[in-house]
Image: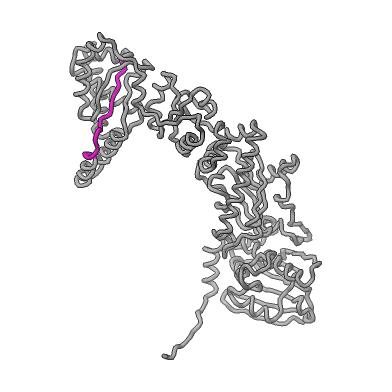
Amino acid sequence: MDNQEHNRFQVELRGLIDLLSQHLYSGPSVFVRELLQNAVDAIQARRQLDPHHAGTIEIEVIPSASGPSTIMFQDNGVGLTEDEVHRFLATIGQSSKRGNFNDRPDDFLGKFGIGLLSCFTVTDQITVLTRSARDGDHPGLEWRGNTEGTYSVRKLTQEIPLGTQVFLRAADGFEEYYEPTRLLALARDYGSYLSPRITLSSGGRSDGVNSTPPWTENPNESLSRQRLLEYGRAAFDRDFLDVIPLNSPSGGVEGVAFVLAEPVHAGSRQQHRVYLKDMLLSTKTHDLLPEWAFFAQCVVNSSRLRPTASRESFYDDGVLDQTREELGSCLRQYLVDMARMQPQRFDQLMNVHHLAVKALAVDDDECLELFADWLPFETSLGRMTLGEYCRNNPVIRYVPTCDQFRQIAQVAASESLAVVNAGYVYDVEILQRIGALRSDLRVEVFEADQLSDRFEPLTREEREETIEFERLCDVTLQRFKCMVEIAKFRPTDLPALYVADDNSNFVRSVEQAQDVSDDMWSGVLGNIASDVSSVYARLYLNYSNSLVRRICGLNSRQGQERCIEMIYVQALLLGHFPLKQIEVQLLNKGLLGLIDWALDAGADNE
């Protein structure tokens, strides 16, 4: 075997700190969290020696007349021995809590042993004074670490209290984090719900950091509910409709969800405020609730979910998946109970968050059957709930796109025909599942051509009067792949209705793509379109409309052609069909012709 020389990696500490501050941590302020975390863990470790130990954390801002301020974090935890100082403070990645993740005590916050490095984002030197409760006979040690990667350790001659003191002096550009007001706000943001008593002192004034966690409040009690709504308004800077208790045994999660007071679009993701063992983990967690729960914003505390190395989010593992399902069950049960026992409140909630309820019901048959009658839909006869629709219509007729609905809504309404616009998210799936679940309902897709069954046919005399005009219309619109049929329908002020099936719509889309494609792709698209049969759309001319009757009786063939082309384009626009290039040219030609006519008429009158 060849001789091999083994060397150690050389780590440039300043570069590593820049990497951590720019890519691992969300910002310099996390040094407060990391120091609080280390202090809490040290206190928990001391309680393993003395279960009755009362832990305290003291933060002090020490101003300097000649330079930047210094801050001190002091805890009365377990402290470090000299061996531990060399092993844990001088070895990157080493932790006094090192070991298998799942074997560590649940009351320890830290896991990764890089927390102290975060302090180098706001200082150039860290000084640690520590005295171990395991070796209390010694007065203590001083450790100094510098950003260039050197450190020193010396034994103290004067005794210090058991525990640890960390001193940081502000680096250039980071003095704001040493301001007492800013530091107090950060300490309260990260650590206000931690159990050790935490105080911050500066200039002879002492402020408490701790407060009562919101997840200990009972949302079902009137006073607590009001306090929680006020907390939610302060935490998220928005108003809420209601508060829901949350619990997940798998993730050791307890907390509350706030129901938004305003509707939000499907797929939006709310930012949740998440704590890990009472320490703030993140204010921007998105994936804690199921996707359908986009109507809620929550504050939760977890004791079991696994944090990432940055301690600002959770690992997306099986435990998080199970936690998400359990929290979703809490929200689901809240909606179910409200629908059964407080229908008026549920109706109010539905007015705001029907989209979220649809998102839940689309994959949950029990919820769908329970909530169905409350679900609102847009119809040709106005907005109504499914329950209101079904009371007057044994058949649920729907069109699957908003464009199709716009094409038929006006005519369907004039015929008192209720057609549901299922072009919005979840609506088609909801209606199809309702049809499968309820035997008393029939659900079917409504085709625009079905409207013609309700049209009034022309009389024999009217048919004879219009037959030549109808043929002219067919010839005129032949190049647009459109056939013409004359009938009577309401509303009478609508001159025409353009109806296209799936095949003709597909061919229109291909031809629009050809308009903007080069010769090669245009040829390919043309071959695709040629394989589609029955591509003709239909234009229904309304003989009840006075304009159509006047065009029909016009003596000028050229005038009739120009008019029918304009009515064709207008019918496309009313149906929200995008115009092909040839149709845009037709529209421009018609408008210019109208201008010419107006100018000629004006000249004749002069």
Residue occupying image coordinates x 40% and y 31%: 445
In the rendered view, would you say 555 is above or below 206? above
Q: Is residue 541 magenta?
A: yes
Q: Is residue 507 left or right of residue 202?
A: left
User: Which residues, given as a range, are shown in magenta?
Assistant: 529-542
Q: Is residue 548 magenta?
A: no
In the rendered view, would you say 333 is above or below 466? below
- Which quadrant would the C terminus be assigned to in this image? top left
Q: x and y percent of residue 114 in the render?
A: 60, 70
In the rendered view, would you say 306 is above or below 385? below
Q: Is residue 495 left or right of residue 11?
A: left
Q: x and y percent of residue 6 in the render?
A: 48, 86
Q: Is residue 358 visible?
A: yes
How many dots with numbers? 0
Q: x and y percent of residue 540 in the render?
A: 30, 21
Q: x and y percent of residue 562 in the render?
A: 22, 21
